[in-house]
Image: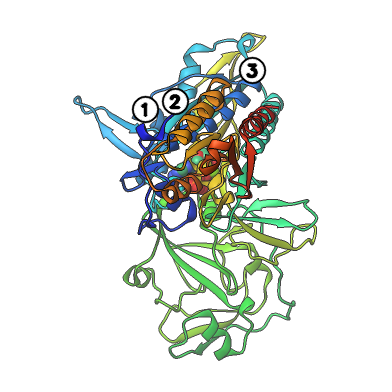
Amino acid sequence: MKLSNYYIPTLREVPADAEIASHQLLLRAGMIRKSATGIYTYLPLGYRVIRKIEQIVREEMDRAGSLEILMSALQPKEIWEDSGRWSIFGPEMFKLKDRNDREYCLGPTAEEYFTSLIKDEVKSYKQLPLNIYQIQTKYRDEKRPRFGLNRAREFSMKDAYSFDTSPETMEVAYQKMYDAYVKIFDRMGLDYRIVLGDSGAMGGSTSHEFIALSETGEGVICYTENGTYGATDESARVYYDLPEAQEVKDLEKVDTPNVTTIEEVSQFLGQEEKRCAKAVDYMLDGKPAFIFIPGDRELNETKLAAFTGIPEHAIEKMEDDQIKACGSYPGFTGPVGLKDVRIIVDKSLTQIQNLVAGGNEKDKHYVNVNYGRDFEGEIAEDLLMVREGDKTEDGETLLFRRGIEVGNIFQLGTKYSESLHATYLDENGKEQFFHMGSYGVGVTRSVTAVIEQNHDDKGIVWPLNLAPYQAIVIIVQTKNEDQVELGEKIYDRLEKAGVEVLLDDRKERPGVKFNDRDLIGIPLRITVGKKAGEGLVEYSERKDMENTDLPVEEAIQKILDQVENMNK
Ligand code: ATP
Ligand code: MG
């Protein structure tokens, strides 16, 4: 392609609302444009990259035996009602009505849709196992769309679904996808980790997340030095380090004027924070609940959602008057004497003696509170947010790193087949539910992960196999006929040899051309300049930015070799 005819609107300035490198560079390199909050247009260069990523995903899915289909982005409400997820997705779902008042959503994912398809099509065990996928636009009305393609409201996801006859064969299907994902993210050249994930809104049991390491990532992975453990911070199990056991003492109510935070309570009463019960006052789907955890910890809302079965979007902080209506007092909430209200207790508190807890009236606390004798509640095994330095079950220390979740695979079991009544007939002619798995790759999010890991202060440094074009020929002076002629000759040669090549024949200053090339990140460059008359050109790679003068043929050969090696 000749740049004189190309749509390549690069920007010199860093766009104001773009916070991270990938977002800034995608805008500056003229690869995407914002259409509305969290909604983007993919411009020619950007769309080429997206299609290359799609192609990698497609090839590896096909190789793993998955079959590509395409379902509509519009999905009928009924199937989501059947699974219960119409309300679970809540405000994150884009919902709409047709002219007859029938309701739909723009699909945020497609477990229900695929299940409803297979339910009517696959009747016999002889047609199983089956794995199907699509690469389709997804819609999520994210609470905080940001970082460009990283957390968009419209994005491209590859989603696959496996259908099996037993938990064992489902696990085989899952492992196949796991292996395919390793190939996919290896081919993208990403530095990533595979960790245990949270099954969250998907339901089901086991899940793994594929997380590209990046300081700008919104995800946190917890891992051990010896590599035996890896999980997201949302899902990592906390083995709480209990304070020393004590003799149980008598319950007492004491004055604690204006002492409300855990830190103040701990100092005022001279008690370690671990022994101060922290109250988290929430409305769970509109109903009040007090959750108690050790004072030195934070509550993990994902775990609370899993424990209560109430989606995170329906978990809200209580207002002061709601706290009072429950017979307590803001800042002084404790589990002693609270009646007719839901109390949830992290298990660790049942094992700590002589707790300090709010007195449910202004300026009062209880001391020497003990579970069983002074209060009771629903005991949750673990509601705590993990912290760096926590120990695993094996006593290994947890370390943290940030990253971008690019893929997520789930074992779903029969959750969706049961709720949508999707069955097949087994060898004995008996109806059975499908055992399912679901598997997502964030296609457009992967673009941001690749850029976060591959850029410098001048721009993007694409790996050769993902670059929008592999090579560029820059004509330094378009007024110089020798340069133009040689430039076009090299360009023709490369194009005929199957190289994806650009010719920068624009009537721009050389500086503009070089800057654009560095910004867009075209990996291989031939510059046709002053020495064109002598048959010499400059060859350079974006990775190291070193320039070498080479005879024309040698420079061309270098590019051909690189492109050929890429496909090996
Ligand atoms: P997150 O925790 O980041 O919100 P998720 O766990 O809700 O993501 P999944 O339901 O697992 O996302 O979707 C599968 C994949 O789709 C994710 O691994 C991610 O790569 C991609 N994805 C999810 N939400 C977005 C989004 N808002 N913008 C771009 N890609 C997304
Ligand atoms: Mg996920």
Q: Secondary structure at mark 3?
A: loop
* 152 lies above or below 457: above
Image region (quadrant) for ligand 2 = top right
Q: Earlier in the sequence, mark 3 or mark 1?
A: 1
**Which amino acid, mark 2?**
Tyr
Residues tagged 3 and 1 counted as in contact (Cβ below 8 A): no
Q: Residue furthest left?
A: 99
Label located before the other in sequence (2 or 1)? 1
Q: For residue 184, which quarter of the picture?
A: top right
Secondary structure, mark 1, is strand
Q: Residues within 10 Å of mark 3 (few under 14, many from 20)?
A: some
Q: Residues within 10 Å of mark 2 (few under 14, many from 20)?
A: many
Residue identified by numbered label 2: 113
**Is residue 311 shown to the viewer in this render?**
no
Q: Horizontal placement of 17 versus 412: left or right?
A: left
Circles 2, 1 touching at the beta carbon (< 8 Å): yes
**Residue 66 on image: x %, y %:** 60, 21
Q: Which residue is mark 3?
A: 129
